[in-house]
Amino acid sequence: MKFRRVLYVFTAASLLVIAVDSVASGFRLSNQNAYVTGRGNAFVATANTPAAVYYNPAGMTQVEGSQMEAGSYLINFTVDYDGSASEFKNNDEWQPVPHFFYTTETTENLSFGLGIYAPFGLGNDWDQDASTFSSITRDAEVSLVTVAPAVGYNLNEQVSVGASINLNMADIDIAQGVGLAPGDTLRFVGDDTHIGYTLGILWKLNNRHSLGAKYRSKADLGLSGTTSYQPLELTSESSMAIELPDILTVGYSYKPTQNWDFGLDLEYIRWSSFSETTITNSPLGDLPQVFNWEDGYIWQLGFTRFLENGYALSAGYNYNENVQPDFLYNPVVADANRHWFNASIAQTRGQYPWSIGYQYGTSDRNVAGDINRPITGENANGNYQTTAHSLIFTIGYKF
């Protein structure tokens, strides 16, 4: 029986590693469970499903027996651009981001887990024939997949702690025009692996109130690959170093009765580490890339109403603070102060618990301070209206 259980876990995990090459629009991917997404991801002080491996590994000690869950986040991200000379939009399409979690309770106080998920992802494509800023960006795909073995331990009846080792596997494919020839394109493709960690703590003050916190370490990536220049068909081995930010999440959960759970989380992301880099040894020489992003916050709040028949209804709201200044604005991210409205339905009973969630995101940003780029004189000034629809589903199995 134990051998079969291990076989189930690693078969599902292997399939997800293969499938996760498709990345979603956006850069920070917080949605790793449909039930949790529905309540606005306000979960660090609750963390009572196998997804605790990601949201707060200290919460794994609350998951009874051995359980597994897997699913996918599907997003369609449309950005409408209105500039002084033209109007167009990105090439939007539905993009999946799978997730997988497994936890097992070895003793009353000790639990182990495994997670495979994508905490960062970016996929965006602007039509080079329509775009007026192709020398800034044309298309990009960036994915960071994390494989995370985790452990949780009860210090006492009120306080538990947890940690995971994060094997981060990054892939990047970015392209932009140069302006030396009509329609020319410079493209960098590279990858790297990095080992980081996550720390978590959960403090149950009493049956109604609990506090939680999680810290995820930064990822220093030395991406190695190739840079090509078209139409001259020039290619060279290149590298680029970037630093993805560390993240601190703190939260509070209030359960006035067994049928209600209210949550409030605040996530601080140190995006100022995403400052500047250089694509080395490209066919056009060393190319500096300047970002100058700012630290930002994500507010997450929501609630769940548990029904007597095992169903759970959740709703929530997220506010993502803009971290990209007007100066050297890059439309590949089209960052803005963004609002997300979430809802989900879940069945928590039985051997196969499941949940389905929906998100609607919207933002409207006017960029006016971007500077003209060398050679082409292009800039990214204009109005960016973003509309996002996403679906997420998760199905579990209790061994």
Image (cartoon, helix red, strand yellow):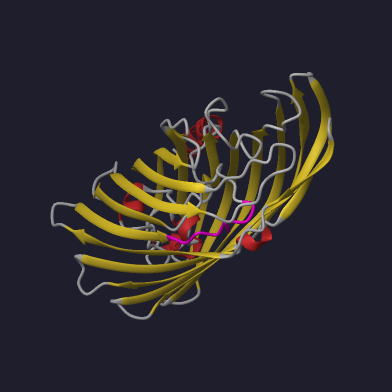
To which quarter of the image does residue 63 belong?
A: bottom left
To which quarter of the image does residue 312 belong?
A: bottom left
Looking at this view, name the residue that lies furthest to the front: 85
Is 6 displayed left or right of 233 in the figure?
left
Give the magenta-colored segment's residue range.
320-328
Which residue is at a point 13% across and 57% down the rendered structure image?
308
User: Measured along the vertical axis of the image, is residue 207 above or below residue 337?
Assistant: below
User: Measured along the vertical axis of the image, is residue 126 above or below residue 220?
Assistant: above
Nearer-the-camera pick, 318 or 111: 318
Q: Position of residue 220 (x, y in %)?
A: 72, 53
Q: Position of residue 89 (x, y in %)?
A: 45, 35
Which residue is at a point 36% across and 69% down the rendered structure image?
264
To which quarter of the image does residue 144 belong?
A: top right
Q: Main secondary structure of the magenta part?
A: loop
Would you say residue 233 is visible in this rendering?
yes
Is 308 displayed left or right of 299 in the figure?
left
Query: Which quarter shows the N terminus?
Result: top left
Would you say residue 4 is visible in this rendering?
no
Which residue is at a point 47% across and 55% down the rendered structure image?
336
